[in-house]
Amino acid sequence: MGWALVEAAEPHHRKGWLKRFDPRFWTVDFARPMMASVTSDAPQTLRVEAVFYRKQDLAGLIWDSEDRWDHPLLAYETKRDFRHTQLTFRWRSGGVKPLDALHGPTLTIEGRDAAGSPRAWYVRLWNYAVGTAEDALVSLDFDALDGGFTLPGEADPVWAGDIDRMFISLVPPAYDGGDGVLGAPVAGWAEMSAIAASGSGSVLAIGDVVMPEHALGIASGYDDSYHLTPARLVRQVVQLGYRGDVVHYVGMSHYMRLEASGGGFYASLAGGVLNAPCAAWHAGFAAACREAGLGAIWSLSYEYFDAYCWGDWKQRASDGSPALTGWAPPSTLLSPANAAAMGYLQLVARAFVAIAAAAGLVPKFQVGEPWWWIAGEARICAYDAATTAALGAASVPIIDVRGPLDAAQLAMLDALGALLATSTAALVAAARDEAGTEGLASHLLVYLPTVLDPAAPAVRRANVPLGWAAPAFDVLQLEDYDWVTGGRGAESAGARAAMVLRLGYPIDEQHYFSGFVLLPEQRAQWAAIADAADGARRAGVARTFVWALPQVARDGFVTFDDRGDGEDDVQAYDAVDFPLAIGREAMVATEFSTQIVSSPAGHEQRASEWAEARMRYDAGPGIRSEADVRTLAEFFRARRGAARAFRFRDPFDCSSAADGGLPAATDQMLGVGDGTRRQFALVKRYGAGGAEQVRSIRLPVEDSVRVSVDGLETAAFLVTATGEILLDAAPAAGIAVRAGFLFDVPVRFAEDRLEASRATFLAGEMTSVPLVEVRAPW
């Protein structure tokens, strides 16, 4: 699998043309607790659905001059000059302030005036409307547009040459700018149809790259994408080459209906389980997936926005504190023992399965990361009232799940596991019942770093219950992004094996989730994510997904497979040794690539283009007999000339020891512990101080690796398939990890031609067999 990070579209990238104000590219924004969504299901039409809970709630329908949400290869151009542009549309609305009212729909334009000073203009749409206050034709000419409530008396001419964004405000009928909770939630909507942009400023360039289809799947989440149109998301999925099922996390903070209580807003079933904006958005998403030939796996987790969660629904620690995640603002975890919480979750599952079925999608449902939360200081959150009542005498104090546990405490963890398994079974049963005769494909998503925490091995009794064992679910889905991005990806293979042993799902009934990158400044983590995805595919999982689309778009991640023409074979690597006897006599060359620019005065500017040297060898001097020629020819044929790489033992530099002798466990510094990290890459260091060069070692010689922790040699480690060491236990913070080893270099034949003759070596002339170092095969 190849991959890249694209900073921005280049001139050679494919582009198309977009009419400004295309309905697919508007967004919505608002403040909690209200909810709104925008869809573009009909040509030249967009529709906003909103639900208001407070008198001051306001939703903005936004057009941004800069595309901040699409992948760089698919974004529209940034063009802040709106002059010579006209926009017309039909406006229809209900449940919001009408066009002619005070605080009615107003176009706010944010930008700069002709002198470059920041400005905002407030354009009352009613001043440019023909028709009624809830059904009118609106015409806007950006060369002759005035802000102000009444015209011409309050006219505030808009300068349209430097606009950042514009938005249309939507407020409830009772909006007056003051505080206060509405007597009941108010559903509102607005529709812009027959949207038409004209004039010389009405056309934008837009990225139109279409990546080849590839084997990776994509995941996404509603909490990250609620403000975009479904059509915009699905366009990105398809044009970035993702196919098959999209894993869609329905989120934990935007799908619910709410009711006011005690100064807050909490989950409600009044009028249904999903709020209208969420239901409309997901109906549009399901339809867009169907039209694009995509499926959808609807993911619902036990995680819930804390501010909206009833107090008795929450998992709680022994001191009564609720389970709270590290997000800001925090989410909580629903208690598997609370009948009301689980009944609510089952209704949510039914609602999303019904949306899928109505769109003609095969119903597929995922229970996402169900677990008992482990709070700070390793306190398990299993002491809410419902759980304590369900366990009865089996509920005993567990102060720290990392410490030694007695028989009663272990029995409690087993009982918690049984409660969790019962709740997930009931959730899947509800989804399956809703699917009816269509049937349902069930999935379970497990987050390995939590449920298989090596510091708390007993927790798996509660969080990987035997009630999940095959065939409880159709597919077991595993994710481990903290390990991957934290340099601990080698732990995945052992964890996967442990899950197979405990739950019995074979590798071809598993999915793997690789990623994600939380912050844009961490985008270098995509290298590890791509490697982990490749590793899972090589291991034989049924499907590998990248988590998640918003981060893929933000960081410009693209991926591609071979074209089915054998190109990947040309990049292949065989884990075989070049004939050692021949290689011992090889000539060695170490090369760098340096750009040197000389000035007329003789001064130079030098730029090193390679972080590490590349090795070249000539194995010809080692050919001493006809037997050597035959050995070499056979090896050359098996590698298909230069097509396949292999291992080569450098006769001058194949040991971690400074003198090239036998390795010792303290030869090379690999890193220092942090209390959690167990995986360390092998390196060899050359030079010292600012001139030190660090060489990555990817092909250690089997059984040659020796490791020391804090200066003491240890055998408590293994060498991973990618040539890194994985310690059985994480070293404490500041503890040095060192290693010694023999190693090989990955090389290929430099040419597709091999020449040798008896006369050559009998005459004492050397045959030339050039080899060149290649990038490690992982």
Image (cartoon, rainbow, N blue to C red):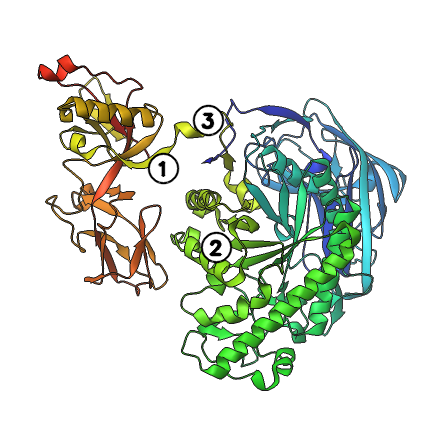
**Quarter of the image with the C terminus in it:** top left
Going from the N terminus, do you reach mark 1 or mark 2 first?
2
Q: Nearer the viewer, residue 85 or 647?
A: 647
Q: Residue at x 53, y 25 (%)?
A: 13
Q: Nearer the viewer, residue 710 or 412?
A: 412
Determine whether the residue tagged by mark 3 lies in a helix, strand or loop: loop
Q: Three-letter amino acid code at disc 1? A: Pro
Label 3 and label 2: CA atoms lie apart by 31 Å
Q: Is residue 605 above or below residue 413?
A: above
Proximity of marks 3 and 1: CB atoms separated by less than 8 Å: no
Label 3 and label 1: CA atoms lie apart by 16 Å
Which numbered circle lies on residue 777? 1
Q: Is residue 512 visible?
A: yes
Q: Which residue is mark 3?
A: 566
Determine whether the residue tagged by mark 2 lies in a helix, strand or loop: loop
Asked whether, in this view, residue 563 is left or right of residue 778, the answer is right
Disc 2 crowd, CA 10 A, few/some/many (<14, 14-19, 20+): many
Going from the N terminus, do you reach mark 3 or mark 2 first?
2
The x and y percentages for residue 748 are 29, 28
Mark toward the viewer: 3 or 2: 3
- State the residue lying farthest toward the right: 132
Q: Three-letter amino acid code at disc 3? A: Gly
Going from the N terminus, do you reach mark 3 or mark 1 first?
3
The x and y percentages for residue 35 are 72, 55
- State the residue lying farthest toward the left: 764
Q: Three-letter amino acid code at disc 2? A: Asp
Q: Which residue is mark 2?
A: 480
Proximity of marks 3 and 2: CB atoms separated by less than 8 Å: no
Determine whether the residue tagged by mark 1 lies in a helix, strand or loop: loop
Q: Nearer the viewer, residue 19 or 300?
A: 300
Label 1 and label 2: CA atoms lie apart by 23 Å
